[in-house]
Image (spheres, rainbow, N blue to C red):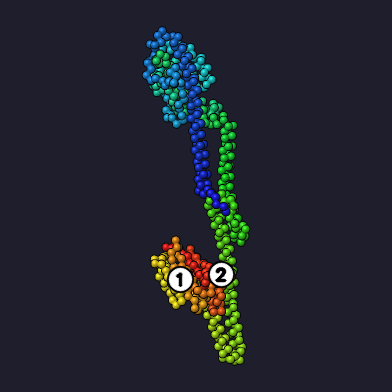
Amino acid sequence: MTERWLPRLWMVLAAVAVVAVVGAIGGLSLVRFYDDQLVRQTEGELLAQGAVLVEVFASKLAERLDDERAYGLPVRVARPRAADPTLTPLVPVLSANDPVLPAPPLAPPANTAAEPRAQDAALAMAALLDQVSHTTLAGLRLVDVSGVVLASSQEDVVGHTVEGRVEFQRALTGEAVSLLRERAPDPRDTALEGLSRSNAIRVVVALPVVRHERVWGVVMLLRTPMTLAKAVYGDRRSLGVTAAVLGGVIALVVLGLSIAVVRPVRALVRQTRAIAAGDDAGAKAITRPRVAELAELSVSLEAMAGLLTQRAQYIRGFTASVSHEFKTPLAAMQGALELLEDEHDALAPEQRRRFLSNLRADVERLTRLVERLLLLARADVVSVKAETAEVTPLVRALAQERVEVSAEEGLRAAMPADALAAALGHLVENGLEHAGPSATVRVRAARLGAHIVVDVTDDGSGISASNAARVFEPFFTTARSSGGTGLGLSIAASLLKAFSGSVGLVPSEKGAHFRVEVRAA
């Protein structure tokens, strides 16, 4: 596989979780935003109606006043103005999260009479209030500065007082007031009256009638905002399109997960089944893993399959070699025993001794084979331990007749001392056995970078090019007649490999030159 960046599985799952959370939060925010919009829409409509009613009421009242500057109460709170000082805009400010005041008690009858001129102006607007209320469905009230209701879209509250209500008290200071109140249950709340009556809050707006920096009265408006259910029903087509889009997004997320995870996992299942069936072609790593962990798993499965195949081939070859190595001496022993048994009396004593000597040599060879096979088996499955070996004294201990040694001081190798000693011992033994009776074996140890290098050389006849490629094969030997088993170098190579070391045959002008490399401690 070509090396390329792939997302981790946790990244994919995190991305899906983020999409789900964002979608949920977005949906909740959309609902809350919708609630805010419905409240502000109602507030804006009431402000617009109230601004018109304020102007009409002010003009009607001004027609009945002799001194406009002496009427009413002084303004105590200045209304915010725009950049243009002639403008006093009314901007919706409510949201669904604002505090909701309790529903007010029914307005009690007023103890004082209404201001006559204000009442006369309000009566002139009664028909207008009724018409506007029927059109906008808002509750409308005109109130004088003492809190007496002068005119209303609901006739049963005319002559009652709203003096104690907070919105009225704040409006008397000159402030434009918008707030939310609980909606008291109404006997008319039935399904036939419309979905808006199911809302539990009302928007209340109180606008002061201001002229010459004096408050002449208050216009109070209230209305129940449209419910989310009714708004959704009204926008059912656009919301249906939105739902379809969201459904498409969810489908894309599911498809993305399928492509990123499900398909590669299915490919991994097919790969494992191919490995179990011994199908080398199907055991190859999947080409599009999509996710890093799945890519690593697939590559590991391919490597495992290759290792299993290699092991199986090694076992088959090893079994054939063992069979051959044991069959030859066993056949010779069986023939010698049959001859001694059948022709014992006819054979001369020298012949019987020669046959017995051959039998002893074959037994000794089989014994060496069994011992070396046990060593090779232990070398192949040796446990890697975090041990170190003092190389200098270990190399010096190899010194004997025909063996010269030298080593730098303080050399330490990252492998157990017994394993390194066994590997070097097999190399020295191989040199003494194959270099000839008069040859000398030299062992030199030195540090080279991050490794310890041990050179084992001899001044014998060397190794031919045809044999050089096979010296580490199990059972390959050129000294079979003298009892060689062909396992010494294989054992040395296996021991070193178990601890990330190596041994190789280095070209040499004379004799054989083996180089051992192990990691320095």
- The image shows residue 62, relative to residue 193, as above or below, that is above
- The image shows residue 201, relative to residue 74, as above or below, that is below
Q: Residue at coordinates 43% horizontally, 72% vertically from top-left?
A: 405
- The image shows residue 85, relative to residue 508, as above or below, that is above
Q: Secondary structure at mark 1?
A: strand
Q: Which mark is residue 443?
A: 1
- Residue located farthest toward the front when viewing the structure as drawn: 509
> Quick check: can you spot residue 422?
no
Pointer 1 local density, CA inside 10 Å: few below 14, some 14–19, many at least 20: many
Q: Which mark is residue 513?
A: none
Q: As shown in the figure, which amino acid type bears the numbered disc 1?
A: Val
Q: Residue at coordinates 48% horizontally, 14% vertically from top-left?
A: 56
Q: Residue at coordinates 46% horizontally, 65% vertically from top-left?
A: 453
Q: Quadrant of the C terminus?
A: bottom left
The residue singled out by tag 2 in the image is 468
Q: As shown in the figure, which amino acid type bears the numbered disc 2?
A: Ala
Q: Secondary structure at mark 2?
A: helix
Q: Marks 1 and 2, how far apart in space?
A: 20 Å
**Front position in the image: 403 or 309:** 403
> Quick check: can you spot residue 511?
yes
Q: Residue at coordinates 59% horizontally, 37% vertically from top-left?
A: 244
Seen in the image, is 514 located left or right of residue 323?
A: left
Q: Position of residue 350 (x, y in %)?
A: 56, 90
Q: Earlier in the sequence, mark 1 or mark 2?
A: 1
Q: Position of residue 97 (x, y in %)?
A: 45, 31
Q: Position of residue 436 (x, y in %)?
A: 51, 77
Seen in the image, is 245 located left or right of residue 63?
A: right
